[in-house]
Amino acid sequence: MKQFQTESKRLLELMINSIYTRKEVFLRELISNASDALDKLAFKALTDSSVGLDRGDLYVKVEIDKEARILTISDNGIGMTAEELERNLGIIAKSGSLEFKSGLEQDENRDAADIIGQFGVGFYSAFMVAERVEVLSKAFGSETANLWVSSGIDGYDIEPAEKAGHGTTITLCIKPDTDEETYSEYLETYRLRELIKKYSDYIRYPIKMDVTHTNTEGGESREHTETETINSMLPIWRRPKAEVSDEEREQFYRAKFYDTEKPISSLTINAEGLVSFTALLFVPRKAPYNYYTRDFRPGLELYSDGVLIMDRCADLLPECFRFVRGVTDTGDLTLNISRETLQHDRQLRVIARNLEKRVKDELKRLMTEAPEDYAEFWTAFGTQLKYGVISDFGAKKELLSELLMFRSAGLKKLISLREYTDAMADGQKYIYYAFGDETRSNPRTESILDTGYDVICLEEDTDEFVVQTLTTFDGKEFRSVNSDDLELPDSAETKEELEKLSAEYKDLLEFARNTLNGRVAEARISLNLKGAPSYITTRGYVTLELERYFKSLPNGEGNQMKAERVLEINAEHPAFDALKSAYADDKTKAEIIVKLMLYRALLAADVEIESPTEFAELLEHLMVS
């Protein structure tokens, strides 16, 4: 018996116990190796007319002998000589595929074939499920065959053997079941079909199996066996876009991602350049039930030349686009030794940037060309885009800002920020926003709308963080309707009147501020409150809405975040006349009116009042006076 090299022994032991996280991938590795052997022979046929081989004759076959616990994977590819068996299987991490590919790449007159194997370790994954492995191989054009046999790290034997045709047959003696592992599953036809469809469905050669069917006729059951091709071979995303119908894409999406509804949009990408890849992406119509939970696993299926590498590669799309489903296929990625995870290299980043841009462009197209579909998408995933703006200190805000939608207080419908700015009136400086259902119920919103300016409504807790993160759009600053200075287009007469009233009632306003004893930073006259006697506005970064949000945090973490409040008093309201009279004749009554103006303003702004008892006492005093 020949011995593996010392380093090879250690690597084999490590491989069997550590490198692969799922034992089932052994079948993927062995089929990939068979595909490599078929590729080599097909390439030889192209470059050597004496081969006389039709590519359609090449195949992989998987066979089961359940009673003997034997699993066989065979191919009619290039095969190996005794020397190649020694070189490729006697030294772990000596990859014949990698050597073949390197040779092609050094020849400027040849195109490198799509060879999957790189590390020369995939074959040894067989020892995860087999206690003994035999490799019977006959090189194309050779008269003799050879048999390589090993039971693991103890070593291997190579001896002459008989084989009818060229190619390689790998025979696995499947391990007995244990309390921890059920190896018998790899002797079940349904399980092997499942693994072939999962990992090797798009291998370019037929993968054949003998499948037994049972027919019941006349009360009798009869079995017959047929050889079936298990894999699809040509993936839908590699076919020319013009040759794939919408119905085929929809059927693929429903079957692949278990969705009962057709997607809102599909996107086919065939990129060539420094990194070449194909992709087929879908925008779902509805969010899965667990989408906004920790249980949801985002990511695209990632294939390497048709072989499934990862069923959820989250690094191919940013978190803000985690709703996208689909597949990406490339031969240009650097994989780790087990081919189960990626090396995070430049190629991956290039693909990710390309996909990110293409998804955004597709969503912009939907917004413009199919607004009803985009509105449906926004209902399902708008919150995700908002979180994307806020996350990572606004790193993706430029990417996402054009995709955001808000309800227009003036138009009574969802609009984009681009639609808002395109419709801005001459001289309008700001993008005005209100909260919740504030439209004409907010006197300041009413004043803004009356000028011909529109107001967008923020209807979720995250919305104010979104506008605070964006700060501007298309050069226009966001401004709350509750901001202390709206800078509306007042007439010269209005400005002059406001300055006159502010000067005239300076002492009264100072009295109001002192009466409220720190509860407001300022009391001022307003001519923009329509029918309301008073209203609360703020100045500075912290708004009433932010204050409310921070106050809702657990353990009182946000109680220190207070808005700097301004009490605006409507100079055109009868309540102001009552305040003027009381200030002149009855300061106690004037204090009551000022406090009631504050409470009225806070309640109108849906702000929790600090002292309901005081409010009740003031009302009682007013009722009996």
Image (cartoon, rainbow, N blue to C red):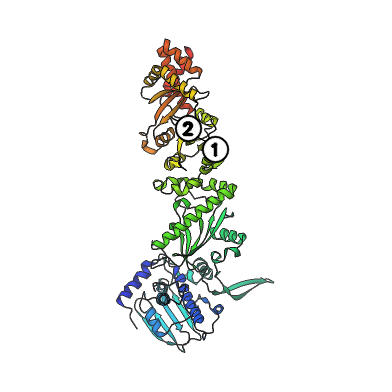
Spatial CA distance of label 1 from label 2 is 14 Å
Q: Quadrant of residue 89?
A: bottom left
Q: Front-most of 24 and 426?
A: 426
Q: Position of residue 163 (x, y in %)?
A: 48, 86
Position of residue 311 relative to residue 30, above or below, is above
Q: Front-most of 142 and 74?
A: 142
Q: Residue at x 45, y 20 (%)?
A: 596
Q: Position of residue 106 (x, y in %)?
A: 40, 76
Q: Badge 1 is on which residue?
A: 408
Tell me, yes or no, if residue 347 can be seen here.
yes
Q: Residue furthest top?
A: 585
Which element carries disc 2, helix, strand or loop? loop
- Give the class, few, some or many, for how many residues have Cα within 10 Å of label 1's Cα (few <14, many ≥20): many
Contact, mark 1 vs mark 2 (Cβ under 8 Å)? no
Determine which of the numbered discs, if any, sits on residue 481 in the image.
2
Q: Quadrant of residue 178?
A: bottom left
Task: Tell me which amino acid carries mark 2.
Answer: Val
Task: Tell me which amino acid carries mark 1.
Answer: Ser
Position of residue 292 relative to residue 52, above or below, is above
Position of residue 440 relative to residue 183, above or below, is above
